[in-house]
Amino acid sequence: MNNIVLIGFMGCGKTSVGIRLSYRLKQTFLDTDNIIEKEQGIAIAEIFATKGEDAFREMETQCIEKLLEDPIKHIISVGGGLPVREENRKLLSSLGKVIYLQASPDTIYERVKHDTKRPLLQGDNPKKKIAELLEKRENIYESVAYATVCVDGKSFYEIMDEIEELVKDRRGDRSEHENTSN
Ligand code: S3P
């Protein structure tokens, strides 16, 4: 069995879906942001403020490298910017079945509009920031995904059912990796 790796933009529901899926599939749930915060002993926003985004991106790469060595297979949610590094995309493909949770800019905005913890969405006009960043990242997410699940207007149950169907066969190795976006 292989890991299930959830990717997607901030607010697409990676963590909420991942936790519920981990109960359903009786697998542990891990979140790269959470791992990094624990290791560093400070919140992501503080890492960005004190060490800078580049340092955070390096931490993300190291986090994925460590997960690749873990013999236990998990449900893993990764930070929204992690797949942007090409190096990380290669690592993600080896890590497991990568599922892209695709959300529209409106869905994302509704979910994150009161958020104060995500440094990239602070400041004026978060709606514009979301649209711009999502446009830059959409193809990147698609390119690394084994499959895409659109989350707009769907319940957690519907999203989980779709993921479960997609990952039915998880003896997976790299040869299984192909983009089956729908
Ligand atoms: C980021 C997404 C965040 C977190 C950091 C940067 C991004 O994770 O890693 O604030 O670049 O999209 P979530 O996607 O879990 O919010």
Image: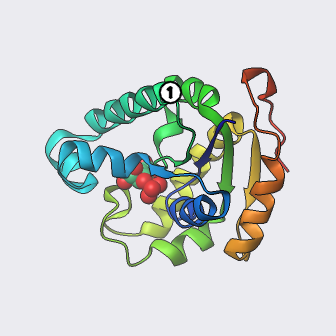
Q: Which residue is mark 1?
A: 68
Rendered position, 175 above or below 166: above
- Measured as percent of width and height from the top left, residue 164 is found at 77, 56
Q: Quadrant of residue 3?
A: top right
- Relative to 119, 110 lies left or right: right
> Which is nearer the eye, 120 or 123?
120
Give the colour scheme shown: rainbow
- Measured as percent of width and height from the top left, residue 105 is found at 60, 66
- Measured as percent of width and height from the top left, residue 139 is found at 67, 41
Quarter of the figure that contains the N terminus: top right
- Relative to 122, 27 lies left or right: right
- Relative to 43, 75 lies left or right: right
Q: How many marks?
A: 1
Q: Quadrant of residue 121?
A: bottom left
| Residue type at numbered disc 1 | Leu
- Relative to 109, 24 lies left or right: right
Label 1 near ligand 1 (CB < 8 Å): no
- Measured as percent of width and height from the top left, residue 22 is found at 59, 58
Residue at x 80%, y 60% (from the top left corner): 162
> Which is nearer the eye, 109 or 78?
78
Residue at x 44%, y 50% (from the top left corner): 31
Residue at x 50%, y 22% (from the top left corner): 87
Rendered position, 159 above or below 26: below
Residue that extends furthest to the left in the rendered view of this protein: 50
Badge 1: how crowded within 10 Å, few (<14), some, or many (20+)? some
Secondary structure under the numbered disc 1 in the rendered image: helix
